[in-house]
Image (cartoon, helix red, strand yellow):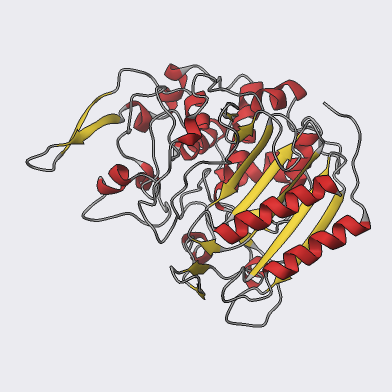
Amino acid sequence: MESQVHTLSEAGAEGIRKTIDAATSDPTTQIPGCVFVAVNRAGEELISHASGRMSVDTPAPMTLDSVFWIASCTKMITGIACMQLVEQGKLTLDDAELVEGILPEVKRAVVFTGFDEKTGVPGVRKKETGITLKMLLTHTAGFAYPLFYSESRKLTLPVGIEEWARKLEDIEGPLMFEPGTRWSYGTGVDWAGVLVERISGLSLEEYFQKHIFEPLGIKNITMFPSATMKANLVHMHQRYSDGKIKTRGHIQRGPLNHSSSDEIFNSGGGGCFAQPQEYPKIIATLLNNGTSPHTGIQILNPATVDLMFTNHIPEMPNFAREPIEAAMPELTNPIAELYPQPHDQPQGWGLTFMLTISEGASGRGRNTGWWAGLSNLYWWCDRERGVGGIIASQILPFADPQVLSLWAQVEAAVYQG
């Protein structure tokens, strides 16, 4: 791993700003607005740039104070919380009996076996394998999001599902396969967050603030935005099949209408709101092997960070080459392959995020961690090269081609610059 602290030339930064501004120049057909921030392992911002509008319907400009629902970017934070408890000996990665003793809901989960051809009634059976923390953090426990998997969505009918969990019961449901045998993206990290709550005696929001955000000097990441944060909330947008963008109701309304952790499920899988400049403080801490370069406080041991960036499913080298369907097209586009790369390169998964095991086309180094948020936010953390960042927008459905293209361009430009 390199020890060099990289910087970005002013010419490189200016080129990135121009690229972003071009991508937001027509809010009705391009990206209404976005924020991009990149940092080095010293926690120094290589670039931070806000562009476009808060809403396609108003001229209010996007700023670095703008607040985004960061959705599944929350998962990496939950992973840190879990690994803090592993360091303390309160959790282990491979003890199913411990996990299922704390989570009886997970212990009693059954495995879906298919729909009866004549009656349409779903069949289930008892699972044969206990669910471990590692399975929850690597999406191999069997849970699957209904928006990405049609059979999982069909299981919720005729009632359907809330767009996002508001109480614990919302994430209960059958497993789509025997634990440990496959990969599917689902609510495993939400259950890991419940583990954190039950072991610590704190709500997940309280735990994040006390053990992660305060030590890192983070003031504007939360599951329950303050009045000031709500005043800076970016509007949610929908891109329709004709390519046009319109505003829509927010997908994560519960925490915006309630201010108490007691009233709304604290989603470790997707509950946080943030100013994008704050999230890279977590990335920089991981780049710096678990110690904040801003405050000097250590929140994880270096060996634990190494473990998080280790591929924990080497037996599934093509797990993300199975296409993800648009079971709910208003929320996601179909995804042919997560992070396309040469097929001779294995894919990997760390503890809550995907790994680019080989060097990436953008210039990223080996074992770079990355993941995303449903409303088209994408982050990366390259410990080998000592750089990372986040691009944030608020557009549905997921995997918006224009945001993906812009992310690829600006990430590559950081390395080139």
The residue positioned 50% from the left and 55% from the top of the image is 398
Provide residue 304's location: percent of width, then percent of height.
69, 24
Provide residue 163's location: percent of width, then percent of height.
40, 57
Question: Splitting the image into 4 quarters, where does residue 176 fall?
Answer: top left
The residue positioned 56% from the left and 58% from the top of the image is 401
Q: Nearer the viewer, residue 5 or 131?
A: 5
Q: Residue furthest left?
A: 118
Residue 63 appearing in the image? no
Q: Nearer the viewer, residue 87 or 69?
A: 69
Q: Is residue 170 above or below residue 393?
A: above
Q: Is residue 67 above or below residue 102?
A: below
Provide residue 416's location: percent of width, then percent of height.
83, 47
The residue positioned 61% from the left and 23% from the top of the image is 86
Question: Splitting the image into 4 quarters, where does residue 332 fall?
Answer: bottom left
Provide residue 361's location: percent of width, then percent of height.
70, 40
The residue positioned 57% from the left and 33% from the top of the image is 200
Q: Nearer the viewer, residue 110 or 181?
A: 181
